C-alpha cells in the first residue's frame, strides 16, 4: 500500500461487466484514515503544451516509482 505525500498513482480497475482489468491514473492524498485515492481518474490539461508535457512526465515518473495499486 502506498504512503507518503501527494502523487499520481496508476490504479488497476476491474470492469464489472466484462471482468477485464483496465488502468487509470488517480491522485493520491495521504490521510489519517488510510489511502486517499481520488474517486475518478485525473484529466490531463494545462495552460500550454509545455505544461501538459510536464504533467505527463510527472505521471510517468510516479508510475515508475510507485507501480500499480488495485482500486477497490
Image: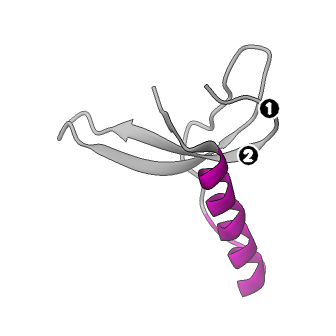
Label 1 Cα neighbours within 10 Å, binned few <14 / some 14-19 / many ≥20: few
Whether 48 is drawn above or below 29: the answer is: below
Label 2 Cα neighbours within 10 Å, binned few <14 / some 14-19 / many ≥20: some
Specify how the rendered protein is coloured.
one colour
- At which x and y percent is residue 20? 23, 42
- The overriding secondary structure of the stretch rendered in magenta is helix
- At which x and y percent is residue 8? 67, 49
- At which x and y percent is residue 47? 78, 79
Q: Image quadrant of residue 4?
A: top right
Q: In whole angstroms, how far apart are the C-alphas of marks 1 and 2?
A: 9 Å
Q: Which numbered disc covers residue 4?
A: 1
Secondary element at image label 2: strand
Residue drawn at (61%, 54%) of the image: 64
Task: Tell me the residue that label 2 is attached to.
Answer: 7
Whether 72 is drawn above or below 24: the answer is: above
Secondary element at image label 1: loop
Work out whether residue 48 can be spotted.
Answer: no
Residue drawn at (17%, 41%) of the image: 18
Q: Residue furthest front?
A: 65
Q: Residue furthest bottom?
A: 49
- At which x and y percent is residue 57? 69, 69
The answer to whether the residue labelled 1 contacts the one labelled 2, judged by CB atoms less than 8 Å apart, is yes
Q: Which residues are magenta?
A: 44-65
Towards the viewer: 59 or 49:
59
Residue 49 inside the magenta-drawn segment: yes
Residue drawn at (75%, 73%) of the image: 54
With 8 as the anchor, is 50 left or right in this view?
A: right
Q: Image quadrant of residue 15?
A: top left
Q: Residue furthest top?
A: 33
Residue drawn at (73%, 46%) of the image: 7
Amino acid at each position: 500500500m502506498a504512503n507518503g505525500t501527494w502523487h499520481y498513482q496508476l490504479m488497476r480497475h476491474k470492469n464489472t461487466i466484462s471482468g477485464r482489468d483496465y488502468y487509470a491514473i488517480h491522485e493520491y492524498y495521504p490521510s489519517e484514515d488510510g489511502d486517499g485515492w481520488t474517486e475518478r481518474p485525473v484529466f490531463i490539461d494545462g495552460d500550454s503544451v509545455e505544461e501538459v508535457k510536464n504533467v505527463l512526465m510527472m505521471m510517468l515518473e510516479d508510475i515508475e516509482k510507485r507501480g500499480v495499486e488495485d482500486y477497490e
